[in-house]
Image (cartoon, rainbow, N blue to C red):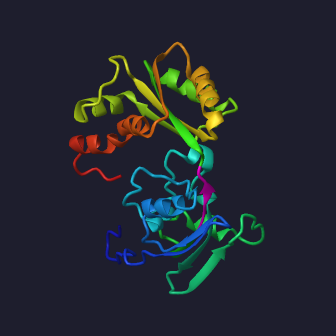
Amino acid sequence: MPLHGGLVLSMEHMNQIIKLDPDNRLMVVEPGVTNEQVQHAAAQCGLFWPPDPTSAAFCTIGGNLAYNSAGPRAVKYGTPRENVLGLRAVTGGGDSFRCGVYTTKGVVGYDLTRLLIGSEGTLAIITEAILKLTPLAETKATMQVIYRDIASAAQAIATIMGQTVTPCALEFIDGRAIDMIRHHARIPFPPHAAAMLLIEVDGARAEISPAIDSIRRAADNDGMVSFVSACEREEIQALWKTRKALSPALRTVAPKKIN
């Protein structure tokens, strides 16, 4: 926000999905479309857009790209920079330009698309984005692993990322955050919980059980307190509830906090 004068520019009325092209796995959207709207539209064609911030229900694509907000799936699918093919934008001088491509391979010229993503509106205002879509996996599973100290959780992360099954999401929550969730969201945790990993894997149905086994072996060390896995939607949502409860819990401690 400008401290000494300036303008606040609202893009909320530029909220149209201009084009959904399943054959080429892309979607062209205006900046006021929310991440959640993109996911719902893509899912109708068996696709999804990998960036998945916790605020997806009200995070607009314009804001998503301005901050390069990725969410926990970045560990496998990358950030918005890896999932946007091109942009249309307007400079501070009022000139409109387009950068990027409509194809997976685009190797010539300056990569202005990646430069603009994450620039927080300081270089240009994004008015249109070509999003690169990915096929939805057949199924997924979520694991919650709790450790008695941060060092054990950190070692588990190194081991998990060093084996052949790449998680599609990997979130770390420390002991202070666990205490906050426990006290303010009434979610139970083991008494010695000082760190937690939320791990998700996706793929073909036949691959999920072996993937869970591989992650469990990698996550297991002397500091592990508990390991829980879930494959059903309701069970998965219950495990992720711990992560989604963190932001509201922080507001009880610092009401003026800004994400």
Left-right relation of 45 to 122: right
Classify the position of the N terminus by image quarter. Answer: bottom left
Tally of numbered tags = 0
Please check the rendered image and state whether residue 135 is part of the magenta-colored stretch, yes or no: yes
Q: Is residue 155 magenta?
A: no
**Outermost residue toward the right?**
108
Between 142 and 86, which is closer to the camera in this rendering?
142
Asked whether the viewer can see residue 124, the reply is: no
Q: Is residue 138 above or below residue 60?
A: above
Q: Is residue 210 above or below residue 119?
A: above
Q: Which residue reaches farthest top?
A: 222
Q: Name the image quarter holding residue 85.
A: bottom right
Instruction: Tell me the quarter of the picture where residue 248 sits.
Output: top left
- Towards the viewer: 24 or 30: 24
> In this view of the protein, can residue 150 be seen by the observer?
yes
Residue 135 in picture, x, y percent from top left: 62, 54
Q: Quadrant of residue 139?
A: top right
Q: Main secondary structure of the magenta part?
A: strand
**At which x and y percent is residue 171?**
48, 37
Give the magenta-colored segment's residue range.
130-136
Can you say whether 43 is above or below 166 in the image? Answer: below
Task: Please indicate whether residue 206 sits to the left or right of residue 42 in the image.
Answer: right
Residue occupying the point 44% across, 64% down = 37
Q: Residue at x 60, y 33 (%)?
A: 208
Of 70 and 149, nearer the camera is: 70
Q: Position of residue 132 (x, y in %)?
A: 62, 63
Does residue 65 appear left or right of residue 250 in this picture?
Answer: right
Task: Name the residue rendered at 50%, 87% in the picture.
Answer: 94
Residue 122 in the image, given as x and y percentages of width and height: 49, 70
- Which residue does the image show at 36% across and 39% down from the upper left? 241
